[in-house]
Image (spheres, rainbow, N blue to C red):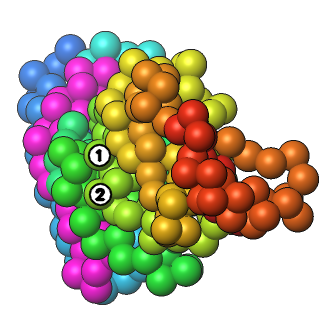
């Protein structure tokens, strides 16, 4: 009997005379099926919590036992839905913490990130930027080991959604991703925002965060927001000839930023 479940229900079911099918309308069999969700969830939690000393990536095999596919039998579909209802109310989803201790939260409390932003975070981490407060921007962040396309089915089944676009407006300044990373990574961040601007960030508070670097009169790196540039508070310019950037910054300082024009740092 094909259940479409990734695990075997081993019990003393009453079978049809052909011994090929379980009598799903039988009270004895129904009683067994009623016990399956609690038994499954108990074992699942035990496996997740007993793996606290193991890498998060090792949890992927455990999450593979979650019955994400529907069953052709209504009685078994009901079992699947009950398992889902119980799982979403348990602290079973690993979060990215950058700490030795693993943190688990309920599925609806955890959010996924866009893959290009994960790349930026991983590079920032390699550069030495501390990201311990990543989950302090209004949503716990799913562990990068599970935030992958091949886990989409499981994550969708549990109700783990992507973080709101507004989350990025809190994370970028809160994690010091503008001034705390290399120029190469800063430009990668700008490219990410530019590519997602119309689809995700146009109507968010990202337009108000200090984001665009420019060289001030003292030669220091200062920041304008997109909103300030829109309102002509200042203009940030980039030279088409990179070799002339330092020269332009020096002359701009001499002429006292005529017209509120500043150049990106060299």
Name the mark on residue 170. Answer: 1
Residue 4, horizontal then vertical, whole percent: 47, 32
Name the mark on residue 264. Answer: none
245 is higher (above) or lower (below) than 100: above
Q: Secondary structure at mark 2?
A: helix
Foreground: 164 or 23? 164
Q: Which residue is mark 2?
A: 174
Residue 100, horizontal then vertical, whole percent: 28, 85
* Label 2–label 1 contact, CB within 8 A: yes
Residue at the spot x=35%, y=70% of the render? 131
Q: Is residue 113 visible?
A: no
Residue 249, horizontal then vertical, whole percent: 68, 60
Q: Is residue 125 visible?
A: yes
Residue 252 appears left or right of 64: right
The segment highlighted magenta reads 76-104
Q: Is residue 140 magenta?
A: no
Residue 250 appears left or right of 79: right
102 is higher (above) or lower (below) than 140: below
Outermost residue to the front? 255
Q: Is residue 95 magenta?
A: yes
State the separation of the CA atoms marked 2 and 1. Answer: 6 Å
**Label 2 crowd bin: few (<14), some (14–19), many (20+), radius 10 Å:** some
Q: Which quadrant does the C terminus fall into?
A: bottom right
Foreground: 177 or 158? 177
Residue at the spot x=51%, y=59% of the render? 216
């Amino acid at each position: 009997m094909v259940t479409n479940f990734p695990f075997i229900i081993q019990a003393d079911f009453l079978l049809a005379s052909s011994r090929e099918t379980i009598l799903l309308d039988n009270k004895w069999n129904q009683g067994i099926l009623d016990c399956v969700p609690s038994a499954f969830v108990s074992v699942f939690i035990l496996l997740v919590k007993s793996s606290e000393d193991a890498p998060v990536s090792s949890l992927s095999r455990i999450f593979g036992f979650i019955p994400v596919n529907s069953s052709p039998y209504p009685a078994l579909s009901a079992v699947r839905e009950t398992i889902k209802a119980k799982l979403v109310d348990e602290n079973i989803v690993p979060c990215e913490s950058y700490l030795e201790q693993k943190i688990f939260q309920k599925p609806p409390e955890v959010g996924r990130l866009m893959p290009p932003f994960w790349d930026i975070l991983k590079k920032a981490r390699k550069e030495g930027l501390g990201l311990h407060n990543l989950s302090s921007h209004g949503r716990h962040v799913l562990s990068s080991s599970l935030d992958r396309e091949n886990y989409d089915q499981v994550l969708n089944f549990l109700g783990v959604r992507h973080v709101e676009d507004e989350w990025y407006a809190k994370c970028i300044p809160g994690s010091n991703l503008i001034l705390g990373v290399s120029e190469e990574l800063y430009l990668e961040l700008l490219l990410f925002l530019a590519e997602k601007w119309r689809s995700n960030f146009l109507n968010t508070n990202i337009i108000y965060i200090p984001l665009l670097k420019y060289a001030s009169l003292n030669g220091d790196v200062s920041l304008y927001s997109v909103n300030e540039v829109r309102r002509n508070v200042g203009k940030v310019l980039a030279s088409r000839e990179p070799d002339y950037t330092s020269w332009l910054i020096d002359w701009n300082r001499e002429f006292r930023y005529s017209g509120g024009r500043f150049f990106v740092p060299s």
